[in-house]
Amino acid sequence: MNGAIIRSRATKPRCKRTSCARIALDSLSPDHIQDYLNATFGPHIFPPEFAAHIHDKTEGHPLFATNLLQYLHERGDIAKTNEHWSLSRPLSEMELELPESVRSMISKKVDSLGEEERRALEYASVEGQEFLSTVVAGLLGVDEVDLEELLARIEKTHRLIVTRGEEELPDGSLATSYRFAHALYKNFLYGGLVTKRRVMLHRQAGEQLAQHYGKRAPQIATQLALHFERGRDFARAVEFLIHAGDNATTLYANAEAADHYTRALSLAEKLPDVAQAETRVALYGKRGATNMALSRFGQSVDDYVSMLKHQEVFDSPEKQAAGLNALATTLFFSHRLEEMEARADEALAAAKLAESETLRLDTMGLMALKHAAYGELALGRPILDEVIRSARAINHKPALLTGLTWRGCLYFFQTEYKRAIECEQEAGELASKLRDGFLFLTSMFFLGLSKGNLGHMSEAIATLEEAIQMAGRNGDRFWFPRMPNCIGWMHRELQDFEGALKHDQEGLRVARQYHVLEAEANSLINLSIDHTYEGKAEETISAFRETREIF
């Protein structure tokens, strides 16, 4: 796409004497901007993400995008070397600020507003890129109908905002929803407010939205957290950041959840001393769980250690046992088995002190897991059987999930594949209900392998491919690298040697990317077998040597 193509996206003014029709330009997509780069700066060796960066900065506004590129060219950031256009410095080091010509144009458009119009849009900018008439009218202290009539005139005359439609709020209020035509307009207007005014308006906007949504306020937790943080109501900001993290967790968006909890922890120090300890305990526990789900085991250990330290003031055996169980779990997957065993012993003592059967069962599940890791199956089996039986009796689902998952694992290693499938199918259903992404993937892993060992290869491959997709969404780095070489083994059993080689190579790549030695060793062993089938003796020997070095 060249400059002429961009101009053709708008209907040219049709003039007859002094009459003229004006039509707004359409927004450009990242692909359109890439086409423009290819046509204007061809041939080039720009990084693949360059067009997307330009789009993000300008939101695809044709005039802003082309002006920014021209500005980067004039500034020397885009230069021609050896017949190719390229960036003169890494994209990460470039400040993509808009040129003065664009900033001046925005300023002129805003300056053309009347005082009442400008004030309305400044207050609207506090709510964000999108805003509701009900909230803005409340901030201004004006009649909502009068405000909507004013906004209609602004939209028609100045084209700074766009009506999105009507929206019924949970409390029954009917509001009209708008958005700024471009984020740059919103940012300019927001910048016109003095700091104390912004603080006051953010708090008021948060209070209004929370009132409109009532019990459903957690649904817009991220938005409310931002308003209350900027409004310096830190207690409510932390409250809604926790809701935002919890919302993300239910969607298995663990990285996003961890970010919300981290932000809440940074604000917790601004809370009154009385509330700080309890808040920190809750947040470290929640972030520890999300880091566990993300396979960030070291960070998870640190979170749970901090949680236990802050909850000492409560002198609660129940809290101590629960915290120690969480810590012992992540220590296990960190391969710190001696520490894990010591913490599990402490957890069991705390559970007995608290006279809590549920906490005792949680700890016994960990004890069985430790025995399984040491290969002590005869010791682990009866413990898991007891955990499953007792957890069913008192309907304690977390311990039941742990028991079923690892009992299925033991059945698998004892080649009792049908019984393994029964356990893992029930565990998977329970993990889904409890939103436990890590144990859900664990159950999927052993379910897929068990099906494969029974010869149900199509079902097995489908199970593991589904698990790989979910692991990618969850941010899992523990089970994800272990799955491709399992699928490779299944393709080899089906005499699909090309498919086996492809998956085993992918398994090796992913294992090395995430530094998972067990998965790397398994992939190398599988590749050794693949090379043997190909008759490539040197490659076979080389792969086995690498495996030996890992062991």
Image (tube, rainbow, N blue to C red):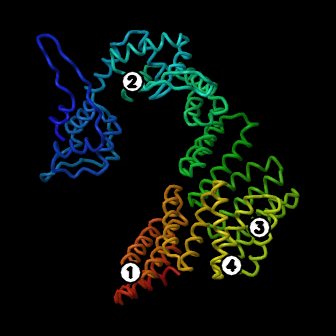
Q: Which residue is mark 1?
A: 497
Mark 2 vs mark 4: give the one in front: 2
Up/down of 57 relative to 193, above or below? below
The residue lying at 21 percent from left, 44 percent from top is 35
Q: Earlier in the sequence, mark 1 or mark 3?
A: 3
Label 4: few (<14), some (14–19) or many (≥20) C-alpha neighbours in 10 Å: few
Residue where numbered disc 4 is placed: 374
Comparing 547 with 113, the one in front is 113
Q: Which mark is residue 162?
A: 2
Q: CA distance from mark 2 to mark 1?
A: 57 Å
Residue drawn at point x = 30 percent, y = 33 percent: 27
Label 4: which secondary element: loop
Q: In the rendered image, which quarter contains the N terminus?
A: top left
Q: Which residue is mark 3?
A: 388
Residue 175, how many percent across, how many down? Answer: 52, 21
Which amino acid, by three-letter code, is at mark 4?
Answer: Tyr
Residue type, label 2? Val
Dot 3 or dot 2: first in sequence order is: 2
User: Is residue 70 rendered to the left or right of residue 420?
Assistant: left
Estimate the x, y position of residue 352 in percent, counting from the top left. Answer: 87, 61
Q: Quadrant of residue 441?
A: bottom right
Q: CA distance from mark 2 to mark 4?
A: 64 Å
**Cβ atoms at labels 1 and 3 below 8 Å apart:** no
Secondary structure, mark 3, is helix
Answer few, some or many: residues within 10 Å of disc 2's Cα (few below 14, many 20 plus, some between 14 and 19): some
Marks 4 and 3 sit apart, C-alpha to C-alpha, by: 21 Å
Q: Label 3 crowding class (10 Å Cα cut-off): few <14, some 14-19, many 20+?
A: many
Alpha-carbon distance for marks 1 and 4? 34 Å
Q: Secondary structure at mark 2?
A: strand
